[in-house]
Image (tube, rainbow, N blue to C red):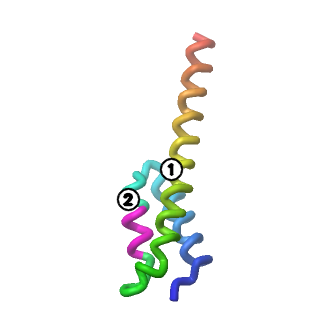
Amino acid sequence: MLDTNKFKRSVKEWVRENPNGSLEDLVDYCEELIPPGQYNNYSWIVDQTAGWYEHVLSTRRSARLLDQLESDDVA
């Protein structure tokens, strides 16, 4: 059985340790956290995590673009 709280903590730690990690890298990592033979029961958490991380990446891109626009205004 997968401990979802441990899973979430592990994902957050991975994100902190891999600030430039890709979505594919995170999905691979998540799949490794699921015990063998239980993927079908827990594939939903990988999908949910991927959706969350897509949002994180989008937010980071927006923040970088905003920073760039602001720095262009100053120059």
Depicted 57 relative to depicted 14: above or below: above
- Write down the quadrant of residue 29 in the picture: bottom left
Q: Which circle marks residue 74 in the picture?
A: none
Q: Which quarter of the picture shows residue 25?
A: bottom left
What is the crowding at mark 1: few (fewer than 14 residues within 10 Å), some, or many (at least 20)? some
**Residue appearing at x 41%, y 79% in the figure:** 39
| Residue 13 falls in image quadrant | bottom right
Q: Where is residue 3 in the image (x, y as percent from the top left)?
A: 57, 83
Amino acid marked by disc 1: Glu
Q: Judging from the image, what secondary structure is the residue with disc 1 in?
A: helix
Disc 2: CA contacts within 10 A as few (<14), some (14-19) or many (>=20): few
Compare residues 51 and 30 and report the one nearer the observer: 51
Q: Which of marks 2 and 1 is in front?
A: 1
- Residue type at tag 2: Asp
Tell me what residue is drawn at x 37 percent, y 56 percent. Answer: 24
Q: Which residue is drawn at 54% across and 58% down?
A: 16
Image spot of residue 40 (x, y percent): 42, 79
- Does residue 48 appear left or right of residue 74 in this picture? left
Earlier-in-chain disc, 2 versus 1: 2
Q: Give the range drawn in magenta.
A: 27-32
**Disc 2 target residue:** 25
Was residue 30 drawn as part of the magenta stretch in this picture?
A: yes
Looking at the picture, how far across and down is residue 72, in whole percent? 56, 15
Total marks placed: 2
**Where residue 54 is drawn, which disc sits there?**
1
**38 vs 19, nearest the viewer:** 38
SS of the residue at dot 2? helix
